[in-house]
Image (cartoon, coloured by chain):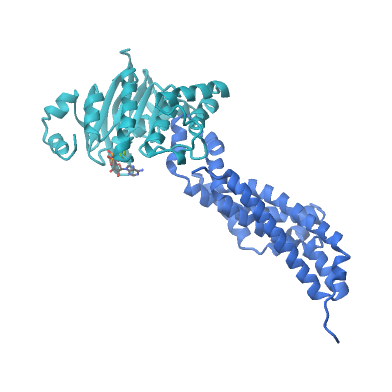
Chain colours: A blue, B cyan
Amino acid sequence: MDFYIDYSVITSSLGILFHALGIDLYMTLFSVVLGTLIGLVVAFALVSERRIFRILSGTYVAVIRNVPLLIIVLFIYFGLPDAGFVFSEIPSFIFALTIYAGAYVAEVFRGGILAIHKGVGEAGMAIGMSNLQIIIFIKIPILIRSTMPALSSTYISIFKDASVAAIISVPELTFHIRKINLETFRTIEAWSTATVFYVVSCFLIAFLLRRVERRVAIPK
Amino acid sequence: MTERVLEISKLHKSYGDHKVLNGVDLDLNGGDVISIIGSSGSGKTTLLRCVNLLEEFQEGVIKIDGREIGYSNSKGKRSKVNNKQVTKDRALTGMVFQSFNLFPHLSAAENIMLALRKVQKKSKKESAEIAQHWLERVGLPDRGSSFPGQLSGGQQQRVAIARAIAMNPKLMLFDEVTSALDPELINEVLDVIKSLAVEGMTMLIVTHEMRFAYEVSKKVIFMNDGVIAEQGTPDEIFKNASSERLTAFLKNTRF
Ligand SMILES: Nc1ncnc2c1ncn2[C@@H]1O[C@H](COP(=O)(O)OP(=O)(O)OP(=O)(O)O)[C@@H](O)[C@H]1O
Ligand SMILES: [Mg+2]
């Protein structure tokens, strides 16, 4: 049997593959935005003076970070319907990925909060700002700017992790590539295409995030 | 302007078992400038932080314009006032820190405007005008759009003074505001404080700059081991120091 390369099976499905990539981006965007909001709240809970907040947030982060994403996805996809909550594949996966992202983002933000000079918050107090105002107008803006580089790499990881959705048959990129592989046996063509799609996407996302990073950076 | 602005009586403060303030009594009338000197660890910073309610204290009363701040005493029982009231009471005093503590993500003008807008609920336009007024007042009329990272230490500290005073506090507290500065930048900051003194601002100033304390103060306080060990006019303290402790302290400082 001769070995040969034939990308025609790929070129004929390019439209589908781009659409599938769109689904990955869509799920990532949702999870990253929601996960960042969750991460922000959880991070402040992690450093809170109230023990109960620390315990609850600490448990969430510890559990999520020590369980494979695949397990979280399967748990939510198969477990929630048993508990009476029925979601279709994509919302179910977004839910799982959001919870997952929240824990990682929370850790990034926690580091950022600890790095904010204590005096900055005290200066806010001294001019009569409430704790909530200090968090909203001082700490969060500093935090987002200072953690942007670390956040970027977390977001890119989350994008790659969206491929796990294939396991519950979300018609995203990895799912389709695998399908092409199984139907045509063009294994090398299929997975090399996936590689190129992911590398180029990640590169573009990184490029965009770097621009955001530069725009929000604290002027020196 | 001779009404009593600040009244501290029998102030005691400890961190755990460590007593830091051991019964401090101190009064300031409107327009008074009082400097506090004393060796490291004598409790100067802690005293200012108590007045600004950045620290809790176990005993004693601090009154501003005749009203107790931070705590309430009803039927002989002392309790902390709620957070909202603490925030309000704290706004009565302006505090300037050794480490400037400007908000790094905001321009100089925005640093001044933030609390004017969010705390005093002033309009953006009015806040900007007040900010510009104070920037001019501290000698930085055209640095409003600069960020803290783009300013020298002396400039940052002057913005910090403007930020505190723009809130129109009853009393300004300065905690070694020139200690983190290069020598050549110290005077520009001290000059701003002197000009505020001339204008009648009520100020409590912790400093290691003895000549400045001598020139600007109506009264100088020497703290030692958490108490006011000695107090008097600048001449009494610097020229006719009587106690051994004060003499020893002054011998180790530049004048
Ligand atoms: N947060 C804290 N926890 C425990 N002890 C503290 C704390 N802050 C200050 N102290 C202690 O309180 C004492 C007084 O400190 P304070 O900072 O008021 O001194 P200071 O007179 O301002 O000294 P310096 O001239 O070095 O600034 C010191 O012994 C210090 O170690
Ligand atoms: Mg001090």
The location of residue A173, given as percent across then percent down, is: 79, 62
Q: How many numbered callouts? A: 0
Q: In this view, does B255 lie to the left or right of B14?
A: left
Residue located farthest toward the bottom when viewing the structure as drawn? A1
Q: Is residue A119 left or right of residue A196?
A: left
Q: Is residue B98 above or below residue A104?
A: above
Confirm whether residue A123 shows in the render: yes
Location of residue B220 (image quadrant): top left
Q: Residue at x 66, y 51 (%)?
A: A208
> In what quadrant of the picture does the N terminus of chain A appear?
bottom right
The location of residue B111, given as percent across then percent down, is: 49, 32
Q: In this view, does B26 lie above or below B152?
A: above
Q: Is residue A23 left or right of residue A215?
A: right
Confirm whether residue A83 shows in the render: no
Q: Is residue B110 left or right of residue A2?
A: left
The location of residue B135, given as percent across then percent down, is: 44, 26
Q: Residue at x 46, y 31 (%)?
A: B143
Residue located farthest toward the front when viewing the structure as drawn? B142
Q: Nearer the viewer, residue B122 or A85?
A: B122
Q: Which of B143 and A65 is in front in this view?
A: B143
Q: In this view, does B133 lie above or below B224?
A: above
Q: Which of B234 and A165 is in front in this view?
A: B234
The location of residue A103, given as percent across then percent down, is: 61, 54
Q: Which residue is drawn at 57% across and 24% down?
A: B124
Q: Nearer the viewer, residue B200 or A37?
A: B200
Tell me the quadrant of ligand 1: top left
Location of residue B229 (image quadrant): top left
